[in-house]
């Protein structure tokens, strides 16, 4: 038991480091990303980025009735983008819980890093919550699945356990709050593993399982929804609902 507790604490201690630990992310950008948060205007984000990238320029890529995706061209190599919506006074602000996608231009805009502001905290919550009723852990017990054990091992980068969560997503009797919990957990695990490694594990599953997983992740995605350039390898592995 002591060894299990120590292992869990080690995993939790590593959580905040994972999103920023990608060697492809420039050090200058790592230091300013935490300063970008929900509610900031497009110009405020531009001001923060200009402290490290004085020639940064912004470009609107997609837009809807009350939202737009803005890409910030940091230099000749990197583009950082996120979604904004209209707060009612003509100004656009970063959506709550919104993603920041960093794309490497010379690799055909491949997403090399993506982060949700609360990703680490969310996984920490799921690893430490004691609630086993009315949620995914309780529903897992009813189905004979130790979901907490699978999650703990999946966070520790165990591919078989991650596959176990994939298969339970497709074949379990998840509903209501339990289904919502599972969607959020899959979303955070995608961040934690990264697109390439997550997709590598998911690609070994049947189309039924792959589609169930990508749709569950899509259900957890913030407005205006999961775009093909965000975690493109994973996105392409399943059939998406309209």
Image (tube, rainbow, N blue to C red):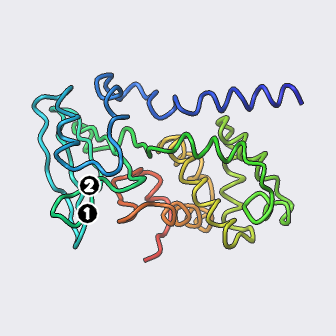
- Element type at mark 2: strand
Side of 100 relative to 151 (left or right): left
CA neighbours of label 2 inside 10 A, class few (<14), some (14 to 19), many (20+):
many
| Residue under label 2 | 93
Image quadrant holding the C terminus, namely: bottom left
- Residue 117 pos. (x, y %): 44, 44
Separation of marks 2 and 1 at Cα, in angstroms: 7 Å
Counting residues from the start of the chain, the first of labels 2 and 1 encountered is 1
Q: Is residue 167 above or below residue 156?
A: below
- Residue 70 pos. (x, y %): 21, 52
CA neighbours of label 1 inside 10 A, class few (<14), some (14 to 19), many (20+):
some
218 and 238: which one is in front?
218
Side of 52 relative to 121 (left or right): left
Marks 2/1 in contact by CB < 8 Å: the verdict is yes
| Residue under label 1 | 87
Q: Which quarter of the figure has residue 157?
A: top right
- Element type at mark 1: loop
The residue at 69%/38% (across/down) is: 158
Number of numbered discs overlaid on the protein picture: 2
Side of 5 relative to 115 (left or right): right
Q: Is residue 153 above or below residue 202?
A: above
Q: Is residue 129 above or below residue 24?
A: below
- Residue 134 pos. (x, y %): 76, 66
The residue at 17%/37% (across/down) is: 47
């Amino acid at each position: 038991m002591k060894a299990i507790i120590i292992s869990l604490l080690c995993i939790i201690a590593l959580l905040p480091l994972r999103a920023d630990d990608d060697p492809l992310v420039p050090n200058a950008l790592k230091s300013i990303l935490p300063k970008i948060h929900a509610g900031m205007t497009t110009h405020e984000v531009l001001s923060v980025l200009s402290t490290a990238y004085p020639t940064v320029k912004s470009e609107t890529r997609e837009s809807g009735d009350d939202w737009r995706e803005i890409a910030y061209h940091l230099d000749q190599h990197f583009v950082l983008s996120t979604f904004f919506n209209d707060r009612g006074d003509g100004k656009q602000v970063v959506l709550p819980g919104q993603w920041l996608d960093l794309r490497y231009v010379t690799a055909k805009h491949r997403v090399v890093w993506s982060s949700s502001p609360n990703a680490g905290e969310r996984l920490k919550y799921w690893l430490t919550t004691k609630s086993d009723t009315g949620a995914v852990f309780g529903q897992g017990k009813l189905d004979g699945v130790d979901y907490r054990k699978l999650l703990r091992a999946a966070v520790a980068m165990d591919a078989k356990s991650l596959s176990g969560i994939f298969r339970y997503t497709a074949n379990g009797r998840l509903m209501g709050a339990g289904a919502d919990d599972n969607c959020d957990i899959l979303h955070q695990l995608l961040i934690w593993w990264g697109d390439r490694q997550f997709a590598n594990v998911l690609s070994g599953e049947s189309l039924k399982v792959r589609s169930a997983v990508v749709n569950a992740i899509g259900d957890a995605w913030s407005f205006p929804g999961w775009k093909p350039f965000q975690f493109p390898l994973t996105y392409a592995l399943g059939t998406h609902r309209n």
